Image: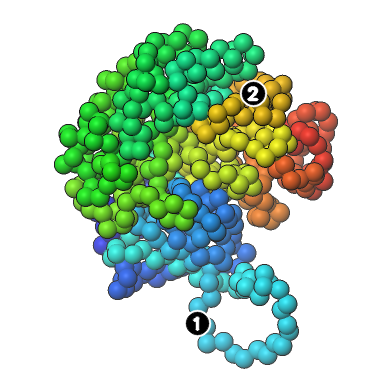
Amino acid sequence: MKKITFGTPEPIVPSQFCENLTPMETEVSYDCSKFQFKTTSRGCLLEFPLEYGEEVFGFGLQLKGFNHKSHKLQLRTNSDPVANTGDSHAPVPFFVTNRGYGMYFDTARYIEVCCGYGKNLHRTPKPDNSIIATAEDLYRKCGLRETTVMSVEIPVAKGIDVYIFEGETITDIVAQYNLFSGGGCTVPEWGLGPIYRCYAKNTGQDVRAMADYLQDHHIPVSIMGLEPGWQSSSYSCSYTWDEERFSDYKEDVAYLLEKGYHINLWEHAFVNATSPIYEALSEYSGDYEVWQGLIPDFSMEQAKDIFAKYHQDHLVSMGIDGFKLDECDNSDFVHDWSFPNCTQFPGGMDGEQYHQLFGTLYMQTIMQALGDTPTLSEVRNAGALAASYPFVLYSDLYDHKDFIRGVVNAGFSGLLWTPEVRDAVSKQDFIRRLQTNVFSVQCIINAWYCERTPWLEFDCEQEVRELLELRMKLVPMLKEAFDLYHEKGIPPIRALVMDYTEDEQTYQIDDQYLFCDKLLVAPMTAEEEERKVYLPQGSWVDYWTKEPVASGWHTVKTAQIPVYERK
């Protein structure tokens, strides 16, 4: 890894807040003389060449795109991406290519990257009167068969620190980036078991009944999640129990713990005036509100200490060992909540910077509250250098193909992602979604808006039981993969191109992935009766039948999820 400084970087950057940063500089083979840097009236601009055939991956949790060559992305925190524009729950200014290197740009700004555009080359005339008859072909910029330019524009800033990582495969490069941020997270084995999140309006008695039903029907669930109704105020949050719905909340918690469940509580960080910590946090919060609640500035130790100590004293001490940190991202396209970019925070950030760092700082605060208590929790926003935090991203969006693409993409950027299951339009849809979810880093059925247990709508309890039993069988394999993630930085789930970087067939495959080093998973949606599956060069067997399967492309038709074991 090598660090290069251009101009005068801003003082507020992600590395400033990375508690586990492990910089170990070496020489790299990348020709740094290729960089062109300049300051502009808009901020600063960095340019460098991309060769023909050089493919670009990463930039965080991208639900709408995969190979970014010839695309323009603005890396902006947004919960509602509607197109392949860079908006994301978790934008990360880090990319990798198939040419042996990756780059991290240490900034908390909404950078714009153009991944391989042509520059003014004073071209000679070349007549061509061919007609293009489709819009797709007409606007296909990637037809440039030449070296192009990658531009990275950082608004406001007048400089940037760039870190270059190298390796033989994309997996090697990503592992170096993850180790730079402190290595992958450590997780408890129980955190990898199935999670059931209860209906938001459930009472304590309802939750107890659900816990009994799951065990009586032999449906394996490790964690019970309580949604907004556990709080006396939830938009914004009080962090105190609602004593109408949970009149015996201490007994409710004890009941779940005695039955062997772990407990995960939903919340967000916008603090209601009824909260016991409201007054103490007031002077350590931004100058705008969200849902009439304070926005704590978690970059300040005072705010972090107040928030963490309350959680530790009143929730963690009861036996709570997980939290779902909601709405620490932003919403521009579907809703209009959250705070504007002009927000000023007492620690020195503006709203743009805080949007990019909010999730990371929130995770740090909850980790402080948990102390030595192990967890695998959930978060709606994570950004740069986040690999060491045991939190999994999720979304309020619900397109199944996008969710699969999220599973494939997350590993490029030191992120974890769950394609959680909520409702469905049919039994087939529910089963196909749960198949994907079982083969992901965290297996969640989130019934927060489902008054009735979702699978009962489709009379598929037996299928759900079998799939969750399968998940339990996969847990030891997944725990082993997480241990490797912590020690070596190798993500537990990876796109095919990460391990098979020289295989051009993998450069556009955004719906298959490697699971725990041993399995290749190719999910199917309810709309698909069959699908094409690519097995890279090597020795493979069908996971279900144990029959050998040749490398190459196959057409698969099955009610199960296509899974292959790498030998």
Q: Position of residue 152 (x, y in %)?
A: 42, 65
Which of the two discs, 1 and 2, sits closer to the camera?
A: 2
Q: Secondary structure at mark 1?
A: loop
Q: Which residue is mark 2?
A: 468
Sequence order check, earlier mark of 1 and 2: 1
Instruction: Say whether residue 392 is visible.
Output: yes
Q: In the image, is residue 283 above or below residue 241?
A: below
Q: Residue at x 25, y 42 (%)?
A: 294
Q: Quadrant of the C terminus?
A: top right
Q: How far apart are the two marked residues, 1 and 2, measured between alpha carbons?
A: 57 Å
Q: Quadrant of residue 183?
A: top left
Q: Residue at x 27, y 20 (%)?
A: 313
Q: Amino acid at mark 2?
A: Leu
Q: Which residue is mark 1?
A: 120
Q: Is residue 545 left or right of residue 190?
A: right
> How would you rate the neighbour count of disc 1 (Cα within 10 Å): few for under 14, some for 14-19, many for 20 or more?
few
Instruction: Say whether residue 477 is visible.
Output: no
